[in-house]
Amino acid sequence: MSDAKPLALLGLTLEELRAVVERFGQPSYRARQLFDALYGQRVQSAEQISTLPLEFRRSLGASEFSLGGPRIERKFVSSDGTVRYLMAFADGQSVETVWMPEGDGGETGDGSEAGAPPRGWDRATVCVSSQVGCAVDCRFCLTALLGVKRNLTAGEMVGQVSAVLNDQHVSPPEDRVNLVFMGMGEPFLNYESFMKAVLLLIEGVGIPASRMTVSTAGIVPRIYDFGAEPVRPKLAISLNAPNDELRAQLMPLNRKWNLEKLMMAAREFPLRNREKLTFEYVLLDQVNDSEENARELAELLQGVRAKVNLIALNPGPGISFATPAEERVERFQSILTAARVPAFVRRPRGRDIYAACGQLKRTLELAEPG
Ligand code: SF4
């Protein structure tokens, strides 16, 4: 049996597709047709690419090339409209991708076209995974318990977005879709594939960079690289503690890149007009959520054009922290606000289906017993 893997078309740039069509003796303009079909129309098989001659479609379908997108293996729908997808790849590995609709979309209940799904939202966010598992080992995160199994390719990241958009019958840029690279994995430990995916999503799928955010746990050298990119999403830094001692306990990577190094990278990050950095702070009861911690955090962020997203811990099995009471969260927020640091409390999405931040592992546990 041959163990040669099929070559995935999804994830190839226009230039790389040119080389493919030439191998089939096709003129190079076919590469653009293939690119538009893969990313713009999000076709699911070579036969669907009606702009290509039938003969080329057939030889493509019979060749070593495959489209290469993930398969939706399982799907969980929350009472708040959030959908958590388990996406399976050809090698049997899987990740989770989350769809989060927001707003009411002016839904009337009877205003949709015949046959069209009712539209109960006016913007939506897709949370994309960048690795199978994660190596960063944040102590409050379920994904960390998996370790890292492998990086995803650019095509596998784009494929998650395409599969969700197809399933939800949504088409950017007409439909307002935001992307956050905050699913499983640390995107900056898979930097090249992540950036390649970003460009394909912009140029091919039609989602502008201004609607994308990447979150890093603090891979400092990549923050500098990212700041130098001519086209890039917005940056969020997962902070979670206002001093090195506490941060190193919660996020062991702080021993390599401590707060001094991280904050220097944050201060030097070339922000655009009106752009702000986002700092994410998961509040853990009696661990990092005291008034003193809030004051220290406000001090740390002085002079940085930033906002803070506060997330009360989403508890899970194997995680030894508790969720703080609402009053503690509010008090923490008010100390930041009083120190002129904009702070927002992020509501957990899809908690009933374990789709909330730090919980993207539940389905894997179910799907991969033992
Ligand atoms: S919080 Fe993010 S970076 Fe940290 S272990 Fe979880 S997935 Fe990795």
Image (cartoon, rainbow, N blue to C red):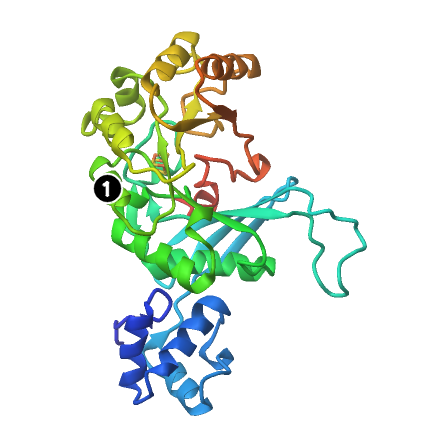
Kind of element beneath mark 1: helix
Which of the four quarters of the rendered structure image does ligand 1 lie in? top left
Residue placed under numbered mark 1 in the picture: 222
Rendered position, 300 above or below 317: above
Along the viewing direction, whichever of 89 and 196 lies nearer the viewer: 196
In this view, which residue lies farthest toward the right? 110
Along the viewing direction, whichever of 288 and 279 lies nearer the viewer: 279
Residue 232 in the image: x percent, y percent?
A: 35, 48
Residue 219 appears left or right of 360? left
Residue 92 in sight: no
Residue at 43% over, 13% down? 339
Residue 283 appears left or right of 101? left
**Quarter that holds the N terminus:** bottom left
In this view, which residue lies farthest toward the front? 273
Residue at 29% over, 72% down? 15
Residue 88 appears left or right of 191? right
Res 225 quadrant in image: top left
Q: Amino acid at mark 1?
A: Arg
**Quarter that holds the C terminus:** top left
Residue 110 in the image: x percent, y percent?
A: 81, 55
